[in-house]
Amino acid sequence: MSLPPVLSHRGASPHPVGSPQTMSLSAEARSKVRGRRTTDQGLDVVLQLPRTGPLQPGERLGCEQGQLVVDVVAAPEDLLAVEASTTLALLQAAYHLGNRHLLMEIQPRRLLIPADGVLRQMLEDRGLTVYSLRQAFYPEPGAYTATAHHGHGARGASRQ
């Protein structure tokens, strides 16, 4: 049994040998740059990438010898769209959702969050319009990207 190829380079050659594979990942999966994954074509691979932030849709990953290239794709996800009748109401919703440390995509007139029945009810109780959709999710990078750390404990506490 052979070991799966190790993807260790970000921004791999734009001219791979053969066709690039694709790997559809959720927003949460794109935040993890280490571990086993499977390409859309069924090939098992190991990610061993530099921890320089989440993977970006359209980013190209490659092996040391350049024999394999994989393009990152944003997978469709079940989401809630949150809309409000006023800018203030939408800002208040963003504040309450941010206090829960949720992944959130901020658009000009709506917020997108992962589908969650409890949050949906809370938002509807606040008078917001909430509806379900399924599409690629591009949350704000937030404080947890790259080397940023954040904690609510004693001074200097961090979350890893």
Image: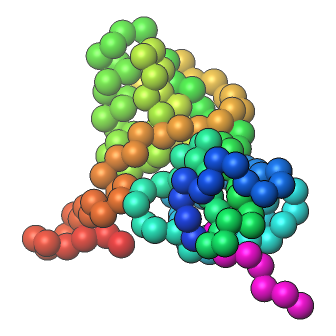
Q: Position of residue 94 (x, y in %)?
A: 36, 32
- Magenta stretch secondary structure, dominant: loop
Q: Residue at x 57, y 70 (%)?
A: 8
In the depicted structure, whether residue 159 falls above or below residue 30 = below
Query: Where is residue 142 drawn, in percent x and y?
Result: 35, 47
Magenta-colored stretch includes residue 80: no
The residue depicted at 69 percent of the width and 32 percent of the height is 135
In x, y percent, where is residue 149? 27, 63
Q: Quadrant of the C terminus?
A: bottom left
**Color encoding of the figure:** rainbow
Q: Is residue 110 left or right of residue 45?
A: left
Q: What is the residue that sits farthest to the bottom in this orientation? A: 1
Q: Residue at x 48, y 54 (%)?
A: 54
Residue 127 can be seen, yes or no:
no
- Relative to residue 141, is residue 4 drawn left or right? right
In this rendered view, identify the residue nearer to me: 41 or 140. Answer: 41
Instruction: Examine the image and state in which quarter residue 69 appears.
Output: bottom right
Left or right, 73 with respect to 141, comes to: right
Residue displayed at 37% across by 55% down = 145
Q: In the current view of this chain or complex, which residue is farthest to the left?
A: 155
Q: Quadrant of the N terminus?
A: bottom right
Q: What's drawn in magenta, residue-wise? A: 1-7
User: Visible in this render: residue 110?
Assistant: yes
Query: Can residue 3 be found in the magenta stretch?
Result: yes
Q: Give the tally of numbered discs.
A: 0
Tell which of 145 and 96 is nearer to you. 145
The residue closer to the viewer here, 103 or 35, is 35
